[in-house]
Amino acid sequence: MGSNPKRRESVKPWLWAWLLLCAGFYLVHIALWLHNRYVIAMEPIGWFLKPIGNLVHVLTLPGWLVARLTLHSWGESDLVAALLACAIGLFAIIIGAMWLMSVRRLLAGNAKPDHQTIIPESDGSNLPTRFSRRKFLTDGLVFGSSAAALSVVADAACIEPARLRLQRYTVAIRDLPREFEGLRLAQLTDTHLGPRVPAEFIDAAIRMAIGLQPDVFLLTGDYVHCGLEWIEPATRQFFPLVATGKPVVGVLGNHDWFNDGSRMSRSLSAVGVRMIDNDRVFLSASGSREFSLASSPVGPSICIGGLGDLRQHHIDPERALAFVDPRMPRLVIAHNPDSAEESSVVSRGAPRIDLMICGHTHGGQVRIPGIGTGTGLMSQYGDRYSAGLVQGPKCLVLISRGIGISLVPFRFLVPPEVVEITLTRSAPTE
């Protein structure tokens, strides 16, 4: 039995669409992920270029999952995995589109007209026009639902990741000196400068933090996404914080260690960020609303401790908080909120911690009402450490939704945020 020539002709446009889209998507991926130096040079158009790359990845997501399962690679720097992901992902889209068109023809192609309308012509003749309500409804359903789905995908990949907001918290701290009442901290975390997050967007978040005029800036890791080339550009972005004259304190995240944590730490230290992975610093009140950092407490002070990354480095709260006056309030910055569950933090005799300030989970990046978030991909405790201020086993834990994107290239109902924390004195206990 020979093949149907008409069917072959109808398939050809879809095949050409698949081939052309594969080539285009693959080139976008290569441009963003394998040519970091060129992308850095083109950063002024990052607002346009990187969201397109994110949309490409979202549209071909089934292909990336297949590449992960078969080649054990996400394809970021793997040309074969990236090609497989683009080909399979786009094949799924093409098959879906062909199926929708087949359903449309099935529902509307053989439908009889529901009524006949006579339209008078200018020359006096009458032109009968057959109009099928069923065809109209079918086309509306097929094209309307497709457009709605595409708009949601485009919003999640291109728009919501740039919908920056400010999130404020007020936290009562035991034994807080009077000089620190109303102390304001600005937290920036998970900026992930790289192929997915435009430098201009991170700059906007930094400007928002500076505009708050806080007393201290806290940086909680993942300054770069991938590639050593991004370390210096990421470092330069944080110099405006230091230039304000306010203390800037930071720790590293897992992505910083993926790329060279020691180099990232040295680079940030060189511009004036006080890096305190498994270390601490003391914030002292040196005047009316003036605060400074010191290695030892000078006058009324609080301790700011830092923990290393839980997965790619290690945490050592004993080292970070050793020999601190037990009556002195301690804030701890740590990239991963799961640190709050570690035995070295919660065991009897572990150092006092009043508030742990973290990032890492990105709020799960996706929230489906009634189901939850994608935090389980980042935290072994699921939604417990998704975002916000929660009570851990030993201390309060504050988790920011972060600024950038990481594991999946989109956000859905989880906008990025800059966090402002105001400290207040807790009521004395009886």
Image (tube, rainbow, N blue to C red):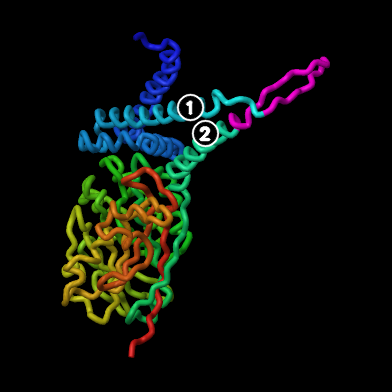
Give the residue drawn at x 31%, y 79%: 299
Q: Is residue 124 magenta?
A: yes
How far apart in space, not on screen, are marks 2 and 1 (Cα)? Answer: 8 Å
Q: Is residue 303 magenta?
A: no
Quarter containing the C terminus: bottom left
* Kind of residue sitting beneath label 1: Met
Q: Residue furthest top?
A: 2
- As helix, strand or loop, the secondary structure at mark 1 comes to helix
Give the residue drawn at x 27%, y 35%: 66
Q: Residues within 10 Å of mark 1 (few under 14, many from 20)?
A: some
Give x and y (percent) for residue 257.
22, 50
Give the residue drawn at x 26%, y 38%: 74
Q: Is residue 118 above or below residue 162?
A: above
Is 50 positioned to the left or the right of 117 in the image?
left
* Kind of residue sitting beneath label 2: Val
Q: Nearer the viewer, residue 240 or 198?
A: 198
Q: Is residue 229 above or below residue 290?
A: above
Q: Residues within 10 Å of mark 2 (few under 14, many from 20)?
A: some
Using the rendered image of the protein, determine whether residue 272 is visible from the camera's viewpoint.
no
Give x and y (percent) for residue 276.
24, 62
Q: Which residues are magenta?
A: 115-136
Give the residue drawn at x 59%, y 29%: 135
In this figure, which residue is indicated by the disc labeled 2? Answer: 142
Q: Are marks 2 and 1 in contact (CB under 8 Å)?
A: yes
Which one is earlier in the sequence, the residue at label 2 or at label 1?
1
For residue 101, the mark is 1
